[in-house]
Image (cartoon, rainbow, N blue to C red):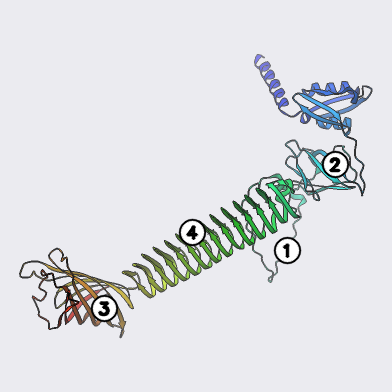
Amino acid sequence: MKAFLFFAVFLSSWLGFAQQTVPILERKISIELSNEPLPSALDRIGRQGGFSFSYNSSIISASQVVTIEVSQKTVREILNQIFKGTIQYKEKAKHLILTQAPISPKVNNTTTTVLIISGYVEDEVSGAKISDASVYEKETLTSAVTDQYGFYKIKLDHVKSRVDLYVRKMNYRDTIVSISAAVNEPLNISIKPITKDSVVIVAQVERKDSVVQEKKKTLAMPYESDANIQNIHDTLYRKAQISFLPFLGTNGKLSGNVINDYSFNILGGYSLGTRMVEVAGYVNIDRGDVGGLQLAGFGNLVGRSVQGVQGAGLFNINGGVTHAVQLVGFLNLNFGKTRGVQLAGFANTNLNSTHGVQLAGFSNFSKGPSMGTQVAGIGNVQLGDYKGSQFAGFANVNTKKINGTQLSGFANIATGHVEGLQASGFFNYGKNVSGVQIALINVADSLTGVPVGLISYVDRGYHKLELSGDEIFFTNVSFRTGVQQFYNIISAGIKPRPGPDNVTVWTFGYGLGTARKITRSLYFNFDVTSQQINKGSFTHALSLLNKVHMGLDFQVSRKISIYAGGTLNGYLTEKSFTDYPDLFTDSGPHIFYDNTVGDVYNLKMWFGWKAGVRFF
């Protein structure tokens, strides 16, 4: 029993506390009054609602009697039923202050006045109060959103004989309320919910010749959760907007539902779209499309397409197709297709295709198929097919087909097909290349063209390991890599036994060559190589043996061939250096030229031979 009493006291206290947290006018009570004097009726209503009334006795007639019977109605609804718009209510602490309402204005077709309309928006089926419903008037763009109790209050300026109030709420039918006389009496509005039974689906036969338009892509925008934006799908138009901040301007709280021809925003503006010109000291925000000129000191944020010119101090961000010239101090970011010119101090980033010119201090990035010219201080990254030219201070990266030119200070990387020129200061990679590669290191899976560099490797190209001998070095090994038309040669050799001074003589070198096909199994080789000949650990003087090779390569099997040919040799040394190795210990070729070059060097020339076996 004690536990039950404790629970009852706790529940009563909790309900009382909850009642106190609800605004006085929204507290629900049930009361029955029969010929009750008005002051006494107010006292009983106050005691039930947990508040007291404050008013001048001159506006409350003691002789007026009240007869009502209500169940779970709000204090506001009960007072509206009693006073019928003649009294105004104002809450202060635990008191409800009653004052005389202004006399209802008289309006006609020639005069205008101010009209205040208030009431509840209710569910037509259940009678429940509906929060976050939009109530607005199209001509003046005056709007209100119902509070958590479903109450709205809207003030209309310059009202004439008739006013149309539009009521919008998600999952409810659009409703229009026409007011033919300006009265201050409360106006409750009922709206009908949309149910499955109320939606009629009409089947349509698709025509074969119908044109399917690309669905406009949209970008998640600020204020998308705003009630007016969620509820209202009407498109409103205005010639011009003047705004200090978003929603603080001539279009008021309906800014996000209005398309303007011109928009002038002191700090920032928010709209559904702009047709001609939009200028802001700080930021422009458009949920929809922008056409014409858009300038902002800080940034432009557009949910859909842009046509014209965009300029901003920091960023331009667009969610749809962009046909424009974009000028920005930091970043251009487009989520849709881009056609035009982009200039950015830091980066241009396009998450769809790009057709045009991109200039950036740091990088250009495109995700979809693109064409044009990309110029970046650091790098260009292209994730779709690209047709055009790329210029980067550091690197160009393509993951799809590229048809054009890649020029960079350090590297070009193309993981798809390349048609054109790759030129960089250090490294080129192309999966399938139809063109020319120029860099210190060139790598490709396949190449139809020529790689020009210190080292070129083509996986499905020309690469052979050679074991050979010549008139000086009977033991040589070299690696040839590139393509048949043009390949690199890295070589090393050693004399089979030390010279008279018992010191090893060895060589290393580099060269270039080409292999021309004569028959199915026979090739003609023309190579030019240069080798440094060393005695002992290393010869710290010019000791350069230069060779021109010409010979025939016969393919014995798919991975083995034999080679033999003649060489023209030129051995260049320094006259002042005396510790050169004795080259001709095993053979003595006929030296047909032995003279001084420039009073510093000596050049010896002779004809020689070379033969070897090649693998792979």
Which residue, as the protein is rendered here, is positioned at the far bottom?
518
The residue at which mark 4 appears reads as 361
Of circles 2 and 3, which is in front? 2
- CA gap, disc 4 to disc 2? 57 Å
Report if the CB atoms under discs 1 and 2 are less than 8 Å apart. no
Q: Nearer the viewer, residue 91 or 157?
A: 157
Mark earlier in primary sequence (4, 2): 2
Question: In the structure shown, which secondary structural element does the residue marked by tag 4 occupy?
Answer: loop
Q: Quadrant of the N terminus?
A: top right
Q: Nearer the viewer, mark 1 or mark 4?
A: 4
In the rendered structure, which disc, 2 or 3, sits on the residue that comes first in sequence?
2
Q: Which residue is mark 3?
A: 527
Other residues around mark 2 within 10 Å, as few (<14) / some (14–19) / many (≥20)? many
**Residue furthest top as drawn:** 2
What's the amino acid at mark 1? Answer: Gln
Helix, strand or loop for disc 2: strand
Residue pointed to by mark 1: 204
As measured in the structure, the alpha-carbon distance from the residue carrying label 1 to the one carrying label 2 is 47 Å
Asked whether the beta carbons under mark 1 and mark 4 sit within 8 Å of each other, the answer is: no
Three-letter amino acid code at the position of disc 2: Leu
Query: As shown in the figure, which amino acid type bears the numbered disc 4?
Result: Gly
Q: Residues within 10 Å of mark 4 (few under 14, many from 20)?
A: many
Kindly identify which residue carries mark 2: 115
Closest to the observer, 431 or 89? 89
Do labels 3 and 4 touch, CB within 8 Å?
Answer: no
Which numbered disc, 3 or 1, marks the residue closer to the eye?
3
Q: Nearer the viewer, mark 3 or mark 4?
A: 4
SS type, badge 1: loop
The first of marks 1 and 4 along the sequence is: 1
Residue at (63, 48) in percent of width and height: 222
Tell me how far mark 3 sits from mark 1, CA to CA: 74 Å
